[in-house]
Every structure is written in structure tokens, then in C-alpha cells.
Image: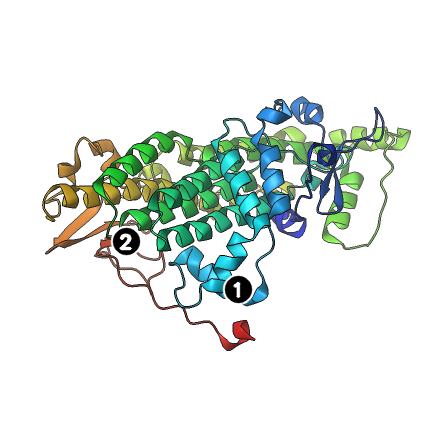
Amino acid sequence: MTRSILAALAVVAGVTLGLTGPPAWAQTGGDDAPEVIIFRGDEMKVWPFEELRSRGYDVVEPPREENAFWVCLEAINAYKDVPKELQEAFDYALTATWPKGHDEALKSFLMDPANQQALAAARRAAKMETFQSYYFGDPKGSIISILLPSLSTHRQLCKMLIVDGRRLEAEGAYDRAFENYVAVMRLGSHVGGGITLIENLVGVACWSLGDRAACQLGLREGIPASQLREMLKTLKELAARRPTVERGLYYERMFGGGMVDEIVTKPTRLFQNLNGIMGMYGDYEINREETGWEKLEARVGRLMLPDRTIKQHFNEFYDRQYELTQNPAYSETWTSFDEEKAVMSIPQWDIFARMLLPSLTRACTISERLRAQSLLTRIAIALRLHVLENKGQPAESLSSLDPAVPADDRIDPFSGKEFKYKVDGKGWTLYSVAENRVDDGGKTESGRLWDLDYVLQFPTPDAKPFEPTETSNE
């Protein structure tokens, strides 16, 4: 539930940043006033880094000219929203290919100077090595009120880079398209290194978009061997940056401990923050000064509530989840773990742990999905290169890809065995057994990714032609 609230905040508070240059980056109202960043006309108060560090979060404050966060803000400020009448074409380009026959308006939108400025800034931010996100809210309130308004816009930037990459592919600029997809993966790595699980998951989602687009590019006819070699080299170097759920779970535990402390020592303030976040009782104001009554409230809470035992229940749950991140999805650790059973094993009197412990197994699974997908992308591109270097003949087995893709990188995280590979004439099918851990013969459910097996094919099946609904044409 804790992270569900934060996830909702990331969407509800997903206002975009209004950045017109260094003077507009931030405003201050005196030595004691919080820094304010302007998000497209909305003022957001910065949660001080020193306060986060006092809670144990390893945030740093690099010079702004070295922090890719600020360049992302420049990009976020510059881009224009997708017009309603172009949304279907935009989504088709994002998930399939460039919508030929319906592409002029979408191309015009992408080539708008404001959007080109945003895409250029996003690519520039992706190449930077340092990224430290800023967080927003009032540190005198509850830790669950921390705001993450840049996440939705960060993801939209990544989507725009993908769609612009499809345009470049349609124009034959394959190298520039691949640069866009690499930028998306690097931006995913940037945001995935934050201090909240939702940042981690958004980073995973962004990386997945870029990785899949790169894979689809590599499976196109007409990509020269020299470019496939360069793609393989780049993807191998990028692998170490791939976001994983491990960091998110580490900080999720810290959020859990902070929640317990607030429940025990400041229950009134906690519920006031919850009411304000959920809009249950309209406007409200919390007394920011610590009063004698608040000191008494904290002392009584410590006496009445067994906070150490509650924290122990939280930690035992997080320990089990963290163990998942240290083992592959096919291991006994995964197959024997029942998250619902783990929560229900907590004594009934500890309603705080039972109610507030978030669902984390799905996050672990999503992280393993990305690992499998990234490995399959490299294998698929290596298979295409093998065909070009061997007079059109597919590889007889995945072992033929050594040393381009070593044996350890050909193991399916969901089976512990080599990814499945089948040759059919001049074509082939490559797949992971996916999270059901069952070999379904390279089948998917209605073509949806991960429903049965996660499948890559060459030649790739033709995409269903783009057919906008009548509403989108109105």
C-alpha cells in the first residue's frame, strides 16, 4: 500500500517542468525558505537533500552543470503534448513501426522546433554520467508525501525518442535511430537509480522500451553487418547500466521503517497527510511546531505500540523479497516463495504491517523480465549478424554465437537453461519460457508479450497496418 500511494502520486502529481534557463530553474525566498522549482507554471517545493541524507538516503548534490537531471528538465519543458488526433499514430509508432500512409502529420509534430529541441536535450542528458533526481514536498510532514512529479514526463520523453527513432528508420537513418534507442536505455538507467521503488520501475520500463526498439531495428532487413557489430558492442557495454529492482527494494525497506516510526510517534500527523493526499477532507493545515502534546503523543505511542516487533515483521518480509533479487527466477527461492502467505503469517494484531507492506514480488518479476529481454536482444542481433556473415544461413545452435554472446549470456533467467532456439529454413525462432517457467513451444497469447513465452522471430511477422479509428480522424 505504501508504494501504491507513491505510484499514484507520481501520476496525480505528474505535472511537467517549466524550465526556460538557469534563472528559472529554482527560486528561493530567503535563507530559511525551501527551494522552489517551476513545473510548467506550478511551483514545487524541493525536499532538502540534507534532510533525506539524515534519514539514510545516499543522495548527492553534484554541480548543476554536471547533473543530467537539469538537462532533462530542459527537455521536459520544451516538448509539446501529443495532439489528441495524433495519439493513435503516435502509439502505433511506439509499439509497432512507422505508420506509413498516415505519417505526415506525425512527422510534422516531431519536427516542430520545440520537440526537436526537447529530443536533442534528452539525448544530451542521456550521454551525461551523473544524474541525481530532486524530490518535492514538505519534510515536516510524512515521508509518504514525497512527490515525484518528473517521472511521467521522463517516460514521455523516452516515448518521443522511440517514435522519432521510427521516423528515422523509415528514412533509412538506422544509425541515428539506434542512437535514440540507446538514449532511452541510458535515461532509464538514470531514473532507475533513484531512492524509491517507483523510480526504479519507471527506469525498468524506459529501458525496456529502448531495448525492444533496438531489437526490432536489428531484425530489419537491410541493416549492414558493420552496424550490427556496432550495435552488439554498444549493447554489451550498456548491460552493466541496466536498472534492477535490488536498489528499489533496499530503499523500500527504509520507507517501511520510516512509516513505522511515524505511525508510532506521530499518528495524528500521518493521518492528516494521508487525508490531504487522498483529498478526503479538503484543505488542511498541520501544526509545524512540535508542541508538548506532540511530545506526549510520541511518548505514549512508544509505550503502547511495540514498534520494534512491527519493524521486525517489516524486515523479515523485506529480507525474503531481497533474497529473490539475489537468485534467478528459476531457483527454489522463487518457486517456494508465496508473498500472500508471507504477509498472512504476520500476527493478526500487527495490522500496520499487514496493511502497509507493499506487493513486491511483481517488481522482482519485472526486473527478471528485463534481464531476459536484454539478453535475447543481444542474441537476436548476433543471429542476424551470423546470417550475413554466412551467406544467409542461420546459426545451427546458439553455441555458434561464441564469443560474441558467451554461454552465460545465453541462459534464460526463467529456466536456468539455454534460451530456446529453432531453425526453420532460412528463418528462426528464439524465445524465453517466461515467468510461467513452462516451454509453450514459442507461443504467445494473442501476440502479447510475456503471456506465455517471450518470442523473437526472423523474418519478423508483418505488423498489422495502422488503421485509425474514426474518432481520431475527427
Q: Is mark 2 on a helix, strand or loop?
A: strand
Q: Where is residue 62 in the image (x, y as percent from the top left)?
A: 61, 22
Q: Where is residue 400 in the image (x, y as percent from the top left)?
A: 13, 38
Image-quadrant location for residue 389: top left
Hey, what amino acid is under mark 1?
Leu
Give the vertical position of 460 relative to 149 (above or below): below
**Which residue is more in the foreground, 118 or 141?**
118
Q: In this view, does 284 lie to the left or right of 51?
A: right
Q: Tell me, yes or no, if residue 167 can be seen here.
A: yes
> Which colour scheme appears in the figure?
rainbow
The answer to whether the residue labelled 1 contacts the one labelled 2, judged by CB atoms less than 8 Å apart, is: no
Q: In this view, does 168 lie to the left or right of 188?
A: left
Q: Where is residue 355 in the image (x, y as percent from the top left)?
A: 61, 46
Residue 455, numbered circle = 2
Crowding near pointer 1: few (<14 within 10 Å), some, many (20+)? some
Residues at marks 1 and 2, CA–CA distance in whole angstroms: 30 Å
Outermost residue to the right: 292
Mark 1 or mark 2, earlier in chain:
1
Q: Is residue 186 left or right of residue 377?
A: right
Give the vertical position of 1 relative to 30 (above or below): below
Q: What element carries label 1?
A: helix
- Which quadrant: the C terminus? bottom right
Q: Residue at x 39, y 43 (%)?
A: 176
Q: Residue at x 32, y 38 (%)?
A: 332
Q: Mark 1 points at which residue?
A: 86
Image-quadrant location for residue 338: top left
Q: Nearer the viewer, mark 1 or mark 2?
A: 1
**Which residue is more in the foreground, 254 or 333?**
254
Hey, what amino acid is under mark 2?
Val
Image-quadrant location for residue 208: top left
